[in-house]
Image (tube, coloured by chain):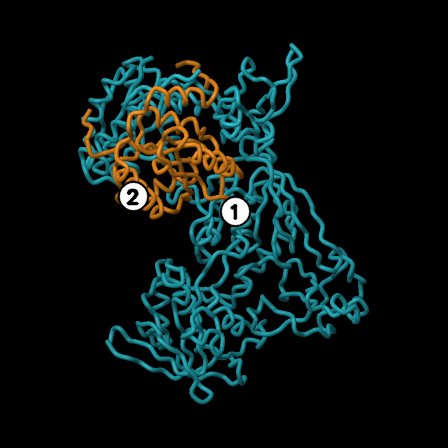
Chain colours: A cyan, B orange
Amino acid sequence: MRLGVFVCHCGSNIAATVDCAAVALAARAMPDVAFAADSVYTCSEPGQEAIVAAVAEHGLDGVVVASCSPRMHERTFRRTVARAGLNPYMFEMANIREHVSWVGRDKERNTAKATDLVRMAVEKLRRNRPLTPREFPVTRRVLVVGGGVAGIQAALDCADGGLEVVLVERASSIGGKMAQLDKTFPTVDCSSCVLGPRMVDVAQHPGITLHAYSEVASVSGWVGNFEVAVRRKATYVDWSKCTGCGECVKKCPARDAPDPFNAGLAPARAINIPFPQAIPKKAVINPAHCKQLTTGKCGVCAKVCPSGAIDYAMTETTVTEKVGAIIVATGYELFDPKVYGQYGGGRYPDVITSMQYERMLSASGPTGGHVLRPSDGREPRSVVFIQCVGSRDRHIGRPYCSGFCCMYTAKQAILTRDHVPGAQTYVFYMDIRSPGKGYDEFIRRAMEEYGVRYVRGRVSRIFPKGDRLVVRGADTLMAAQVQVEADLVVLAVGAEHAPGAHELAATLRVSIDEHGFFMEGHPKLRPVETNTAGVYLAGACQGPKDIPASVSQASAAAAKVLGLFARGTLASDPQVALVDPRRCVGCLKCLKTCPFGAIREEQGRDGAVRAQVVETVCQGCGVCCVTCPQGAVQLQHFTDDQILAEVEALCRIPLPTCG
Amino acid sequence: MPDPAADLRIIGFLCNWCSYGGADTAGVARLAQPTDLRIVRVPCSGRIDPLFIAKAFYGGADGVLVSGCHPRDCHYSEGNYHARRRLELFLRLLPALGIDPGRFLYTWVSASEGQRWQQVVADFTARVHALGPMPRLRETDLAAAALCHPAAPQEGA
């Protein structure tokens, strides 16, 4: 066997703390190594061409590249190796950047460590075998989880691309957070005028099946062939009959149900249609507040419903959908400011959240678009906005910037002047973050045209004085204490992960970060993919995002799905388990431990029962290999032999041979 | 090959999806770590045969660190549950094999937990350094190692 080793400098990223030439020199002495060299950028075009040329010139059978993490460039170099005429699996990477040069300070020790990692890679590669992927058919349907603006965009893009789309939304209407907004920055155009037609498109598109008031219960299968159980919650209204006329809502006597759509600004009826533009525009009964369902004495909605749609005996149902890919667009939740006792912690009625203020500004909101104090219904003359409530504060576990609060605060301050001419507005801020097209200009307009008074500093306390509130804080630019009397205080609450994100992540087998947002495959190169093949991310479920960014990512996710399905078949990863029929004794312990049901019982020609791996189902975890008492199941590309060769490459004394 | 005397031989078995990513995250953030650890990448902590660890010790490793996805967060749904059972049992078996259990650690680090990874590596390296280099094992222990597991396939070796 003739192997080639290429040690990358990565500019100075590796070369600054690792002697790459010494590593290449040491590699030359390793078994089977016929060629070793160092290069400045191995991933660059000349770097890759040097690999192709070296394979031809030195008749190499395999290649080791010592550079960055295989999670970064393994695919890149596998393609290079394939271009050189080798099997792409005759390739190994030694991670001497993320695991060596970036974390170690001592050049001599780093060089020794890098040499060890190269030796491990060489020993592994000596035992590699060429592997070939198999083709398998895909279900050209996509599941979109979440019907906010990102989910809507992803669903429409996929459907326009000719795919069948299943859209699952937890609430009774799609639209998400954007449907709750009055206006959007920086154009100050009506949010529902932008979103409404898109929602209608979803309802009317022949390629989209909408499951509203539903949740993803379980997911099985793998990329190309997922099977998803969708739990359709009981609405107590037969939606095939409901016309959305709203008679039931008008007559319902139970008026104390929570109204999440209006952010708790006003109570809702027990039977409700969240907003006039709802898609689907269907009523849903809240069983915790319905008098008929709690006490058995009412039935008003059933009496008034002209189409006889009310069904108090309805129970939840489950439908199964087969899809080939999944786009997660579950969005975010707003921070609950009750944590901050200094802002009143929910005790003062005139301290409200930005979403409550948004509903107040909306013409379809509970106040009909009039800005009125919740305590006495009076129009405020002075409104104070406090930014970074639940953002950039390590003490409450929210160290990140939510990104959009600076902008929506400026928008709300501008709208305040439109709704209440002559009102004075103050904004307490830490820093203004407005990186977007036309964003900083928008902030300037708020300051200069609308006279919004920006005070740089944190608020230490809010306390009542008569029927007004006193906001006390610091002005760090003036180095002075400031005190402002306010009629209304609006807390610019930040974004946090959507409720249920952890459960959904476990269902979909994708990772979440420490703040509960879904993890992308790579922060720069795979921002839309997850590490689970066939599962993509769109919008704020991956991290706080404003509307343009959410829509962009949704379109990107749709493009990824369309690309995935473009050929009609997928190539399976050949790094799967393989049973050696000569060693297998048919105990079938592997069949019991396989998480994917990828192992089946097979009767050989000799009549003996043995295990067999279904290649297209196996995901390559290797749990079976450790289970097998005979060592008969081996995960290809990660065999016992290969892993132990890496271990042995590190050990000072040779390993004892077992058996 | 230069082999700085101060570095001990610590072998890490890391799952590709969480802990290997966490180690990458620590690298990207330039979180300084001791240089003793060398990482073997495996697809899942469920792929790690306790025999690999025993063999590493018998081969002269001074410490072995295993890290996978947090329970409930496994890329393969349940691989780390299998790992947890196997490794917990293995941990209790170590004294019988003549190996100080302090030389072995299994833990969970997610792909976003770069700082946690830095801490795990620093703490474990310090722990192994406190124990010093691994004493050479006696022939009887090596024989025990050969008995602890039936033959692993050596095809192609």
Answer with the quarter of the image where residue B1 lies: top left
Within-10-Å neighbours for mark 2: few <14, some 14–19, many 20+: some
Image position, residue A52 (x, y; %) = 31, 21
Residue at horizontal 31 percent and vertical 17 percent from the top: A3
Question: What is the chain identity of the residue bearing mark 1?
Answer: A
Instruction: Name the amino acid type tagged 1.
Output: Ala
Residue A172 on image: x %, y %: 64, 59
Q: Nearer the viewer, mark 2 or mark 1?
A: 2
Residue A330, numbered label: none
Mark 2: amino acid: Ala
Total count of labels = 2
CA separation in Å, label 2 and label 1: 30 Å
Q: Going by the image, does A160 lie left or right of B64?
A: right
Q: Which residue is mark 2?
A: B122
Element assignment for label 1 = helix
Mark 2 and mark 1 on one chain: no
- The chain to which mark 2 is attached is B
Q: B101 or A186, which is in the foreground?
A: B101
Residue A505: image tag:
1
